[in-house]
Image: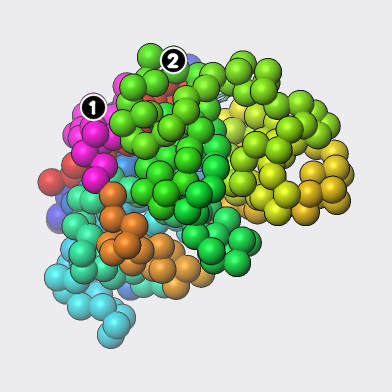
Amino acid sequence: MKTFKALESAKTEQGNKISIIEKNIDDLPEGELLIKVNYSSLNYKDALSASGSPGVTRTYPHTPGIDAVGFIEESTDANFKEGDCVIVTGYDLGMNTSGGFGQYIRVPSSWAVMLPSGLSDRDSMCLGTAGLTAGLSIQALDDFNGNQGFESSSSIVTGSTGGVGSIAVMLLSKLSSSVTAVTGKESEKALLQSLGASEVISREELAEISRTPIGKTIWDFGVDVVSGNILTLLLASLKPGGAVACSGLVGGPSFESSIFPFILRGNALLGIDSVEIPLHKKLQVWERFASDWKLDLSALVREVKLEELEKEISTILDGGQVGRVLVDLN
Ligand SMILES: NC(=O)c1ccc[n+]([C@@H]2O[C@H](COP(=O)([O-])OP(=O)(O)OC[C@H]3O[C@@H](n4cnc5c(N)ncnc54)[C@H](OP(=O)(O)O)[C@@H]3O)[C@@H](O)[C@H]2O)c1
């Protein structure tokens, strides 16, 4: 009987408990592809699943990990063969399907994209769902703006030291936007500048600069992962025709706004989903990261083994994570 190593979260009376266990390949769910996972990455949602937060994972014990890249070991789909390297992110992976924090996953072939040439398996997980979401956000902003690109634009990114935020800062800067990074971590100002931020401000400074219900016109584009009051402030400070792409809720699920940005300035709020969108839309973004959006993420990434993940999970839940955590399953 073939076994593999995995992180498992189990419910106990004292809350969820994390341990590293041996799992049996036969216990994986059904699916066309059996994949030997090389790398995964840590996202905020993984931490919610691992800690038993309501509304993420229904049944425990469970192996989280919404991201995985690896080689196919068995395939019953003619479009994939043994040895192909594939990326799987989102859908039900790591939610209620055993996820990338294990050395093997078995998934439907409809969840897998071929790793594009020009992108290494390791780099794909340095990006992970966070990178995919940053890419989708920037794609949505560009589409809204008639695909004119970002040259001479000004943009603002919230949660900027986190996974989605840090990659959004890098990508917008690479695309020649002048990026304001909003952060709660004054100590990371130099890092954010090295990623390409031309200005770094605190959440409090944002509240001083921006006025609600409608304030000065400052930014063309926003990438927001926080929601709450921060999103309220961003919407009130866009230039005419500007837009905010929102994907997260680390600051809470609700926000207030008024009709003014929408009817006086033609602003838009663009919702970003990286999980359930059609596979070809994910592939488009991976292909861009393999070509014209190629980023050097080495300054942003820390590589850990499964055994080191528990403390990283606590850090991300506390809002203390900086950059990306790559999980090496080899
Ligand atoms: N829609 C989608 O498909 C999708 C995909 C990926 C992620 N998400 C969501 O996006 C959010 C960010 O994910 P992530 O993986 O980037 O998480 P992350 O790495 O933990 O980054 C979040 C960052 O937000 C800031 N932050 C944390 N708590 C805050 C608070 N209470 N108020 C204001 N800012 C706070 C911190 O950055 P600073 O200290 O620099 O401010 C933190 O590093 C999560 O809500 C996640 O669920 C959604």
Compared with residue 274, is residue 216 higher up or lower down, i.e. above or below?
Answer: above
34 on left or right of 165? left
Is residue 167 visible to the viewer in this orientation of the structure? Answer: no
- Say what secondary structure mark 2 lies in: helix
**Residue 110 in the image: above or below residue 132:** below
What is the number of the mark on residue 308?
1
Image coordinates for residue 326, horizontal then vertical, percent:
26, 39
Expressed as whole percent of the image width and height from the top left, the position of residue 13 reads 50, 20
Q: Is residue 17 left or right of residue 290?
A: right
Whether 165 is among the magenta residues is no
Tag 1's secondary structure? helix
Q: Nearer the viewer, residue 237 or 328?
A: 237
Between residues 173 and 258, which one lies in front from this camera angle?
A: 173
Percent of width and height locating residue 120? 19, 57
Q: Is residue 284 above or below residue 174?
A: below
Packing grade of label 1 (10 A; few <14, some 14-19, many >=20) is few
Residue 308 painted magenta:
yes
